Image (cartoon, helix red, strand yellow):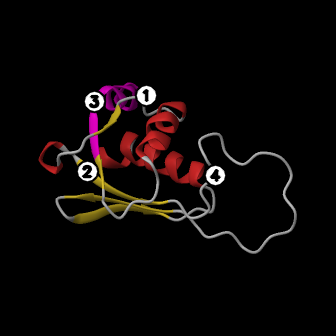
Amino acid sequence: MAASILGQDKPVKIMLATTSSTPAAYLLENLPKVGCSNVSIVLDKSEADYVLEALGGDFEGPHGSEGPHPPRPPRPKARYTLYKKDAAVFGTTPVKEKNAVKDLCKYLQNGSSK
């Protein structure tokens, strides 16, 4: 348990790829909500620990979807790919973007140290 807590305290710097469709503000608001308050977004690749390509699919907006929806066609999936030194080290493709943020946070907390 102590190892996961220590892992959370280590600052992680992420640069968003230019092809990303998810706004940095969405990530900065939602990563702390799922337990990744140690993540910051940087603009300079040389300062970044990772580069994230965040394609939002059916972007829910900062607070998720609101209210009931009429029947609609299948929603496009969010696609998050995390790169370290130009090699893909993590990927997720859930329907909801908030789940992509949770998956990313889980990787940063646990998987990146392995």
Q: Are marks 1 and 2 in contact (CB under 8 Å)?
A: no
How far separated are the C-alphas under marks 2 and 3?
Answer: 14 Å
Towards the viewer: 8 or 1: 8
Is residue 50 visible from the viewing direction of this image?
yes
User: 10 Å neighbourhood of mark 4: few (<14), some, or many (≥20)?
Assistant: some
The residue tagged 1 is 1
Q: Locate residue 44 relative to residue 110 in the image: left or right.
A: left
How far separated are the C-alphas under marks 3 and 4? Answer: 29 Å
> Is residue 114 at least partly visible in the picture?
no
Residue sitting nearer the eye, 92 or 53: 53
Name the side, left or right, on which 41 lies relative to 47.
right
Q: Earlier in the sequence, mark 1 or mark 4?
A: 1
Q: Earlier in the sequence, mark 4 or mark 2?
A: 2
Taking the image as shown, residue 89 lies to the left or right of residue 105, namely left
**Which x, y percent locates residue 94?**
58, 62
- According to the picture, the residue beneath numbered tag 3 turns out to be 10
For disc 4, the marked residue is 60
Q: Secondary structure at mark 2?
A: strand
Q: Nearer the viewer, mark 1 or mark 2?
A: 2
The residue identified by callout 2 is 50
For the point 43% across and 28% down, which residue is it?
1
Q: Amino acid at mark 3?
A: Lys
> If you read the primary sequence from the N terminus, does the residue marked by circle 3 or circle 1 appear first?
1
Q: Nearer the viewer, residue 90 or 47?
A: 47
Q: Which residues are magenta?
A: 1-14
Left or right: 27 as drawn, with respect to 51: right
Mark whose residue sits in front, 3 or 1? 3
